[in-house]
Image (cartoon, helix red, strand yellow):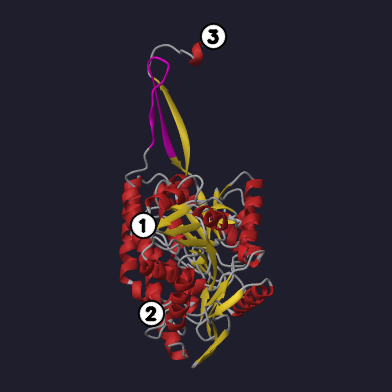
Amino acid sequence: MTKNRDVSGILADVGLSETNSGSFNGNWVESGKERITSFSPVDGSRIAEVTVTERETYEQTVRKSIKAFEEWSMVPAPERGILIREIGNALRLNKEKLGRLVSLEVGKTKSEGEGEIQEMIDVADFAVGLSRQLYGLTMSSERTNHRMYEQWVPLGPISVISSFNFPCSVWSWNSFIAAVAGDTVIWKPSSKAPLTAIAVMKVVNGVVKRLGYPDIFSLVIGSGSSIGELISSDHRIKLVSFTGSIPSGKHISTVVSGRLGKTILELGGNNAAIVSSKSDLNIALKGVAFGALATAGQRCTSTRRAIVDSRIYDSFVEKLVKAYSSVRVGSPFEEGVLVGPLIDGKAVDGFLKAIDTAKKEGGKLLCGGTRLTVKGHEKGHYVTPAIIEASKGMTIDKTETFAPILYVYRYETLEEAMDIHNNVPQGLSSSIFSNDVREVEYFLSSRGSDCGIANVNTGTAGAEIGGAFGGEKETGGGRESGSDSWKNYMRRQTVTINYGKDLPLSQGVRFDV
């Protein structure tokens, strides 16, 4: 599927060519001479080139985004929702084509590639309903003939910096919600997945132009040290939503907070699943395996640790190892493949280094942990998913390795399991597999999971768009997508109206002139 003629077909299907502009601000701008080459992790082949956004083009893009905001913010929110509805419909028509590009550029299986686009469609549907529900509270004033309420006002131009592992859906979590809130959005995608972003922008902005709205969605492409730094330090951009590593997130937070801007940070995860002897072991096995193996362990919600009741530890781990041995690793375009490649050679090196460190720290490698050569895709970036029995004093398990490594632990009491669970710097997703209501309630109590997401009898990986997505501790504390996350993209304003013939003051203060 990744021979030149097939790559050309995938590119043509989504309106891409051998060389593409990475800058859109109402028009596609050939910004400069510097280019990024996108390589497929499936076989290491070159896909296409993208021109990088120069500073002058970036400045032009921000100015245009501000101008578009002035118009777009005055459009009634329900009408904004109609635009997002039409964008969702356009994505439906292009779901298979865009999904194939996702598979080609980042190595997701066919179902996961199309699932990425389906998630965008689902977010669009959610945003349409939200456009009629941007509610504020009404408060009782202590002064006669006064009325108080709060309203939510569009924030302004915002920026979304996304990661390669979800090359477009996380953008939609932010952008579709921000758009119905009245904001404009500047997107900087990962330099490892620029083509997916360009293809999505072509679909989205085709709808925007057809319906005659201002250019509310813009695109800039470049490295984090160049374009990312410009975005972070730009006081005109009211909010920066960043998905990526903890070190990069800390830097962005420092820069943005230094100018008193707002951030949404979705950083690393080191997610654990507790498996009780009182669980349905078939459900637990499937939940842990999918959580650890989906997207080749390259999800921020991937299951990194399984904490297993000692009474079932041996039998459960034996079944887990057996399940791993039956999982097919290979090209995402081939039938029956459940685990595709890692994003690049650097990721493979990180995987192997983590395995070596774990063994040096006393961990026992139970299966996998090697580089894998796939016939016909010898230059692809494949590994055999690993299970490691953790040892006391191990430190590598406190670090997120963005690859399919699962550490397993024994526990005697649920309290011990929770201590193991919470003893990592990250706090994104968590799960417990148990049919004991006491265990479940303890896991969900203030003494239980310290993560932003807590699941019962379902795995850590993945999340429905209707719930607020995000985590605690070094995961960043941000929330995106569902629930009341829309408030991040607006500013709260408390309004007081005096409709009387006097000016009474609050707290009984008197001031006579």
CB contact under 8 Å: marks 3 and 2: no
Q: Assign a secondary structure to mark 2.
A: helix
Question: In front: 163, or 188?
Answer: 163
**Amino acid type of the residue that numbered disc 2 sits on in the rendered structure:** Asp
Q: CA distance from mark 3 to mark 1?
A: 65 Å
Residue to which mark 1 is pinned: 435
Neighbour class for label 2 at 10 Å: few (<14), some, many (≥20)? some
Residue to which mark 3 is pinned: 511
Question: In front: 450, or 81?
Answer: 450
Q: Which range of residues does the magenta coloring cover?
A: 136-152
Measured along the vertical axis of the image, is residue 450 above or below residue 330?
above
**Amino acid type of the residue that numbered disc 3 sits on in the rendered structure:** Phe
Question: Which residue is depicted at the point 64% across and 64% down?
Answer: 392
Q: CA distance from mark 3 to mark 2?
A: 72 Å
**18 relative position to 119: left or right:** right
- Residue 488 position in % (x across, y down): 48, 46
Look at discs 1 and 2 and give the one toward the viewer: 1
Residue to which mark 2 is pinned: 13
